[in-house]
Image: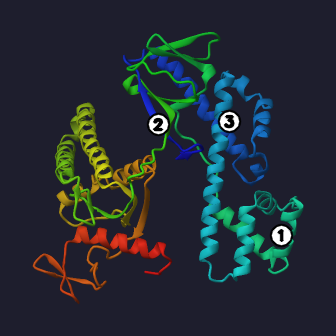
Amino acid sequence: MAMPGNTLCKIVRQYNKIPIPPEQMQKLQEIAVDYSYVKNQVYQRYGGVGGLSKLYPGYTVQNEMTQSGLRERLGLPAVYFYLAVFDGLRDIKIQWSRTKTLVLKRVNGNSGFLEEEKHFLRFLLRVNNAFEAVLNSTDLKLPTDIRRQYDSLATRVQAGRLENYLRRQVRNLHGKPESHREDGFSIGERAYRYGDHGIYISVREKRKRIYIPLTDGNQYDRQLFIRLFPDKSSVEIQVPVYVAIKKHENYTRHLGVSMGMCTMLVTEEGHIYGEELGSYQARLSDWLREQSSMYNQNRMANPGRKKYNTKKQRLEEQLRSYINQELNRFLREEQPELIYIPKLPGPGVCGPVKRINHLASTWQRGYILGRLKQKCTEQSVELVEIFGKGISVQCSRCGAQGVSRREEFFCSWCGLEINKKQNAALNARRRGEENRSGFDF
């Protein structure tokens, strides 16, 4: 996500150079288990409506967790304990944001509410003190100006009925987070140091650190996340790095593009990027289909999966490397300021042919769109997703529906031959420009 100061947060990863000895991995796993346990304790104690008043800024939770004696019972170093507490608080805040979004969606879609009633419920969802007081059935403690606004809204509606509705929706939609993963933990600057082409990480023993040699010599001075892979005797160090967002003066074009399974991107002018995507995906899907058949036939023999995972990872990396290469070329050559792209429907069953289903299951649509969004943000390019129903077979000249003739599409009104991918890109731009100008397409 974008950060203040026109910067973007990216995750850089570091890896161990040699396998980690079992006794060292065991010490790291012990920290990960206790780290997860502390987070779950925070979820249980403060994840419900009773904990709302303590979430901001969070020091009340920190003090209460300190006084509980949990850290001493676990023997967990303070640098890990307090990071686990605030990680748990962050997850609870995210869960409450999700709950509010779901409730707001129900409020907006409820045709039984008057506009004044919807406005009152939106007010309660937006003002944290009011939201907390309603859910806990306590007195409202609001600043004078906000209290005046609440009273003004409440006199025009049946406030009690609407507050009961809000409580009921929260009970139905909100759930306390849970952490079932014990394979990693955050680590602060006081708990590690770089040196000797590796990293020294604090463990339970006082003044003792374990040394992990790394594949690179980069050094960082911020909070890290250590992901453990005990079966591989390895770790992955995730480092948040903030990079400057670039601004190109010559990126001025408004452009429509369409995304496909075999050809990655086609612009409204017919320029093609990722033409070999289909062959890369077919190579991966055909191999997966063959391996699945072989594995099912030899399941009783308990065949290993190490070679399978290695080959699969190699094929996926080749595919994704090609995707990133073509996305970079697309931005470099097209120089867009604004991109319109059709919003695709959710994945589903493609048909009775197994090969087609396997190909569809390996389609990197989510990865392509995610990387395109990331790269657009990095280059200050705006990406707008457009409602895409019928966008490829609707005539881009007159708007009439296309008809099929011998595997080709023509406009039923003006007879224009329709290239479906290019036509989708043209319509994407047209719909996008009309929506931005305030015209209902």
Q: Residue at x 60, y 57 (%)?
A: 98
Q: Residue at x 30, y 68 (%)?
A: 425
Callout 2 secondary element: strand
> What residue does disc 1 label?
149
Residue positioned most to the left? 406
Q: CA distance from mark 1 to mark 3?
A: 36 Å
For label 2, count other residues whose C-alpha is less than 10 Å away and answer few (under 14), some (14-19) or many (20+).
few
Residue 364 place in picture, x, y as percent: 31, 52
Q: Earlier in the sequence, mark 2 or mark 3?
A: 2
Residue 3 place in picture, x, y as percent: 57, 44
Residue 227 place in picture, x, y as percent: 48, 30
> What residue does disc 2 label?
11
Identity, as a three-letter code, of the amino acid under mark 3: Val
Residue 353 location, quadrant: bottom left
Q: Earlier in the sequence, mark 2 or mark 1?
A: 2
Q: Earlier in the sequence, mark 1 or mark 3?
A: 3
**Residue 391 to residue 313: above or below:** below
**Residue 309 to residue 187: above or below:** below
With 16 as the anchor, is 148 left or right in this view?
Answer: right
Q: Residue at x 87, y 61 (%)?
A: 140
**Residue 149 to residue 142: above or below:** below
Identity, as a three-letter code, of the amino acid under mark 1: Gln
Callout 1 secondary element: helix
Residue 121 location, quadrant: bottom right
> What residue does disc 3 label?
85
With 301 as the anchor, is 72 left or right in this view?
Answer: right
